[in-house]
Amino acid sequence: MIFLMTTAPPENSPWSVPMRLPPLGLSYVAAAVEKAGFKVEVLDNYLLRKTLDEVKQMVSNLNPEILGITCSSASYPVCVETAKAVKEVLASCKVVVGGWHPSYMPESMLQHPEIDYVVMGEGERAMTELSTCITKGEDPKAIAKVAGLAYRQNGKMVKTPQKFIENLDEVPFLARHLLPMHLYEREIPFLNVKPFDTMNIARGCPFNCAYCETRRLWGRTCRAFSPQRVVDEIAHMQTNYGTKGVYFVGDNFTINKKRTLALCGLIKKSKLDIEWVCDTRADMISRDLLKSMKAAGCRTIWFGVESGEPRILKKINKGITNEQTIEAFRLCKEEGIQIASSFILGIPGETLEDMEVTYKFAKKLDPDWAQFNVYIAVPGSSLYDEVMEKGLYDRVDGFLTYVKTGEFNYESLMKIQKRYQHDLDLSAGRILKKMKREGFLTVMKKGTRYLRHMV
């Protein structure tokens, strides 16, 4: 029996996301090991916040052979505490950790004897093969053949090479049947319908943004589920969970124009009554593509703009110009597709004047939703390495590194972020747009708090 669970950072952590959504990565792993014939139980502890004593009681009741824990840099301490607690109850249980942080820093996990194995990168195939090896007696030769694995051998860490899943269609549908779907938030401001659900239909990124660690987890080649596979899962969600909207989570939805057009065509052909949101780059859209996307149900596109200062865009290796962003926003507005966007404040080397340029650029772009984020360095990106090497921080919380320069620190950045967000969201023009989009009574009923966008 395999027990899989998520871990959560403290409630006051800057990485504690207010929206409660199903854990995509863990749920795909759960689906894969279940398909292989294992009995699986899932605890989304990011959502449920069970205490260690409650987790220990669950382990005692379930008596699993394997415990799989997802871990981020923010939840690292909680992950380690959980592993220790489980071993106290069931010493024979093999503890396997995976996720963003273990993939980048497996040695930080294996320094704790309570953690037996680390899965680096994609977890579906690795976890299935490892579980088979464990239940058959942990033959060292068999363990060594599992790709993307780190473990201790004779007191030293051994890492096997990662191998990505080329044909993503072999990954089963998300194991939503193992999750408390009735407890998740299934309404989102970007769509006019509810309930909505999330999907991930592509992995890997050929770009090299300095603040992002995606390539190290998913690889440099963008792999995707086939259009038919995507449509089949949407139909499955509609039948079993009443899904009316979908957020396609992932940075590069339109990276392959031919595939995107094929998906849009298939959605229309299948007569799926679905609205959807996607994430993409400003340099990867065109008018004809937007027309097809809108006809297939696309209502909103999220763009990571990050900065309005060309020097900072070059610093983070974004590979997109302000002119490209302006053109992308213009096309979306002309084709009737809503725009959401995000901006980063506090990039190492950025000045207060640079941030003002970004704020003015956001106002000029005038997206339907805008979100300002304060940069916190986490392992896995080249920008994190620079921050650590140059000492550009005033404190480190576990593996979260709070950046500082001669002009700002985290606390002053938070004040700037709140001012920008407040001033932009509560401008008269944006309030009128919100009333037009969502209705006067809805906005007035929910008040000022509703005017602020939180994702």
Image: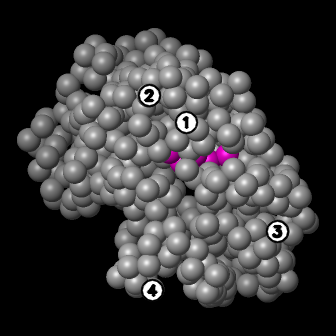
Q: CA distance from mark 1 to mark 2?
A: 9 Å
* Residue 278 within the segment the image draws in magenta: yes
Say what amino acid the circle numbered 4 marks: Thr
Residue 280, label in figure:
none
Mark 4 vs mark 1, CA separation in Å: 34 Å
Of the numbered discs 1 and 2, the one sitting upstream in the chain is 2
Q: Which residue is mark 2?
A: 271
Of 389 and 423, nearer the camera is 423
Q: Does 338 appear above or below 224?
A: below
Amino acid type of the residue tagged 3 in the rendering: Gly
Question: Which of pointers 4 and 1 indicates the residue nearer the eye?
Answer: 1
Q: Upstream in the sequence, badge 3 or badge 4?
A: 3
Please say if the residues under marks 4 and 2 sit with CB atoms less than 8 Å apart. no
**Dot 2 amino acid type:** Lys
Q: Three-letter amino acid code at disc 1? A: Ala
- Residue closest to the eye, 372 or 195: 195
Q: Is residue 132 above or below residue 24?
A: above
Q: Is residue 111 above or below residue 418?
A: above
